[in-house]
Image (cartoon, rainbow, N blue to C red):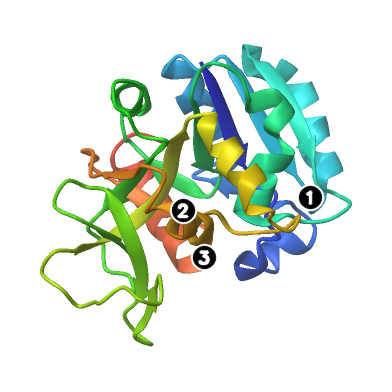
Amino acid sequence: MKAMIVAAGLGTRLRPLTDTLPKALVPVAGVPMLERVILRLKEAGFTDITVNIHHLGGQIIDFLHAHHSFGVTLHLSDERGALLDTGGGIRHARRFLDGDEPFLVHNVDVITDLDLRTFYLRHRQSAADATLFVNHRHTSRCLLADAGGRLCGWTNRSTGEVLPADLVYPDARYRAEAFGCVQVLSPSLFRYMDEAQLPDRFSIIPFYVSICRTARIQTCAADSRYWFDIGKPETLAAAEAYLSAHGHA
């Protein structure tokens, strides 16, 4: 099974830690976040893993070589020339991900006990072009899904912005869900990217919203006991406290 770890971010919210260290190598309870995600993917059966790199990418290359790629087939998608955002990063790594099977995409700065294998297989058993993990945490930026879980739009509840612009929300037909930064994509998504004539750099969520009336983008509120976005000092500290308290350090 194939997976991609989105690890090219600048990590600006974690400065000064990331002034000299790529975000992916910031330790969480003593273990670099990239190592934690790779080992979780490996445990779930993913043996072909792509990692994209940008800020201080040479350190990530050296780290992976020093650990013999953790015993998996590992590809590096090099974005050191230009940071491409989530959607552009996935498209840039297409040569490693395209084919006849879906692939899982996991942000490096997310720590969760989501059952990755079950989540992946659930997508395979569906007719969806993409399945997005969602949870019910409080956030201002939300996906909007119908009763069947199909993505219909997006909203920023702080500003009132809604996409697509002609979508009427609030509306009882739609539920607001928080994206958990883990997703499974079918290779059919690359065709939609080709047809959209996108710039080199683009974000994946606005792209999903732009195609959700033709492509089937599904949300999935799978079970997980914990979920942390460890891209900020306060959430990194909360994740470390939780992992240490529950014997995951």
State the image coordinates of residue 65 (x, y, percent, origin top left): 79, 23
| Contact check, label 1 and label 2, Cβ < 8 Å | no
Marks counted in the figure total: 3
Disc ID at residue 211: 2
Label 3 sits on what residue type? Lys
Helix, strand or loop at disc 2? helix
Say left or right for 172 vs 223.
left
Evaluate whether residue 116 shows in this view.
yes
Disc ID at residue 54: 1
Say left or right for 68 vs 249.
right
Say left or right for 150 vs 209.
left
Q: Earlier in the sequence, mark 1 or mark 2?
A: 1
Q: Residue furthest left?
A: 172
Residue that appears at 31% across and 43% down: 218
State the image coordinates of residue 15 (x, y, percent, origin top left): 67, 68
Disc ID at residue 232: 3
Q: Earlier in the sequence, mark 3 or mark 1?
A: 1
Label 1 sits on what residue type? His
Residue that appears at 24% across and 77% down: 169
Disc ID at residue 235: none
